[in-house]
Image (cartoon, helix red, strand yellow):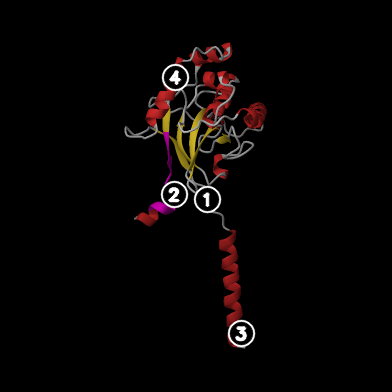
C-alpha cells in the first residue's frame, strides 16, 4: 500500500512538473537595434553603396510634404541614436491627452497595416527575381522597372510610411535572417516601440499582415538602416545567462 501511494505521488509530481515545463514558453529574444556597426561589418559596403545611389536619385517621386519634413526631422541624442519613441514620453492617461494619443496611434497602426496588405498584394504581380547578382535597387529603379525582388519592393513601404508622416527615427529598412535554412530577407521595421518593432514584409516570405518582431522567433534581425544611417542589431544578454557565465 505504502509503495503504491509513493508511486502515485511520484507519478503525480512527474505529471505536474512535466506539464508545467511543457506549458512554459521560451521568452522571446530581446534586441538592441541601434548599435553602431563595427569597422569590419560585412554588410556595411553594400548598405553604403545603396545609400549613395538612393540619395543620388532625382527625388521626383518624393512628395512636397516629405521633402519639407526633411528640414524638420525628429531630434536625436548627442550620440546620434534616436530619442525614445513618442509612446515612452507620455504615461498612461485616462484624460484627453490619453484619448488623443490613443486615437492617433490606432489610426497610424491601421494605416501601416493597410499598407502591408497593399504591398503584399502588389508583390504577386511585381516581384522580379534578381538572378545571380543580388542588386539592391533604388526606389526610382524599382518604379521604372515595374517591380523588383524583396529589397526593391520593400522601398515602397519604407518611402510610403515616410511620405505619410512617420518619423525618420521610427521607420527603417532591416535585414533579417532565418538560421534554419540560412535565408536572408529585407523588411520594413516600424518602431512604435523602440524595443519591439512592427514588421512589414513586402512579399510575405517571412510573414503576412503586420506582426511584432517578438512574435517571430525563427527570424533574427541583423541590420537596421535608412538612406542616411546604419545600425547593427545585437541580442541583449538576459540576467539568467549572465548568472550562468559567472
| Contact (Cβ within 8 Å) of mark 1 with mark 4 | no
For disc 4, the neighbor class at 10 Å (few under 14, some 14 to 19, many from 20) is some
The disc label shown at residue 53, or none: 4
Mark 1 — residue?
Answer: 27
**Residue 22 percent coordinates (x, y):** 58, 61
Mark 2 — residue?
Answer: 238
Name the N-terminal-most of marks 2 and 4. 4
| Residue at (56% x, 21% y) in the render | 145
For disc 3, the neighbor class at 10 Å (few under 14, some 14 to 19, many from 20) is few
Judge whether 109 appears above or below 214 on screen.
above
Alpha carbon separation for disc pair 3 and 1: 38 Å
Name the N-terminal-most of marks 4 and 3. 3
- Asked which secondary structure carries label 4, the reply is helix
Alpha carbon separation for disc pair 2 and 3: 43 Å
**Residue 147 percent coordinates (x, y):** 58, 25
The disc label shown at residue 4, or none: 3
- Labels 1, 4: front one: 4
| Contact (Cβ within 8 Å) of mark 3 with mark 1 | no
Amino acid at each position: 500500500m505504502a509503495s503504491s501511494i509513493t508511486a502515485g505521488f511520484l507519478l503525480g509530481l512527474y505529471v505536474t512538473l512535466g506539464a508545467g515545463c511543457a506549458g512554459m514558453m521560451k521568452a522571446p529574444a530581446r534586441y538592441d537595434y541601434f548599435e553602431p556597426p563595427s569597422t569590419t561589418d560585412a554588410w556595411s559596403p553594400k548598405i553604403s553603396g545603396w545609400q549613395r545611389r538612393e540619395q543620388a536619385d532625382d527625388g521626383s517621386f518624393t512628395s512636397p510634404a516629405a521633402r519639407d519634413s526633411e528640414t524638420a526631422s525628429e531630434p536625436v541624442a548627442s550620440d546620434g541614436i534616436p530619442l525614445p519613441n513618442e509612446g515612452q514620453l507620455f504615461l498612461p492617461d485616462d484624460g484627453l491627452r490619453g484619448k488623443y494619443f490613443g486615437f492617433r496611434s490606432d489610426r497610424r497602426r491601421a494605416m501601416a497595416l493597410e499598407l502591408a496588405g497593399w504591398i503584399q498584394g502588389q508583390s504577386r504581380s511585381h516581384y522580379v527575381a534578381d538572378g545571380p547578382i543580388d542588386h539592391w535597387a533604388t526606389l526610382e529603379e524599382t518604379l521604372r522597372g515595374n517591380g523588383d525582388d524583396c529589397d526593391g519592393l520593400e522601398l515602397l513601404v519604407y518611402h510610403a510610411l515616410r511620405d505619410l508622416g512617420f518619423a525618420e527615427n521610427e521607420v527603417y529598412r532591416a535585414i533579417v535572417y532565418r538560421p534554419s535554412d540560412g535565408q536572408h530577407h529585407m523588411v520594413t521595421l516600424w518602431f512604435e516601440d523602440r524595443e519591439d518593432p512592427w514588421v512589414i514584409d513586402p512579399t510575405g516570405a517571412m510573414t503576412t499582415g503586420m506582426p511584432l518582431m517578438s512574435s517571430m522567433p525563427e527570424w533574427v534581425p541583423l541590420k537596421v538602416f535608412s538612406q542616411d544611417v546604419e545600425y547593427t542589431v545585437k541580442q541583449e544578454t538576459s540576467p539568467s545567462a549572465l548568472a550562468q557565465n559567472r
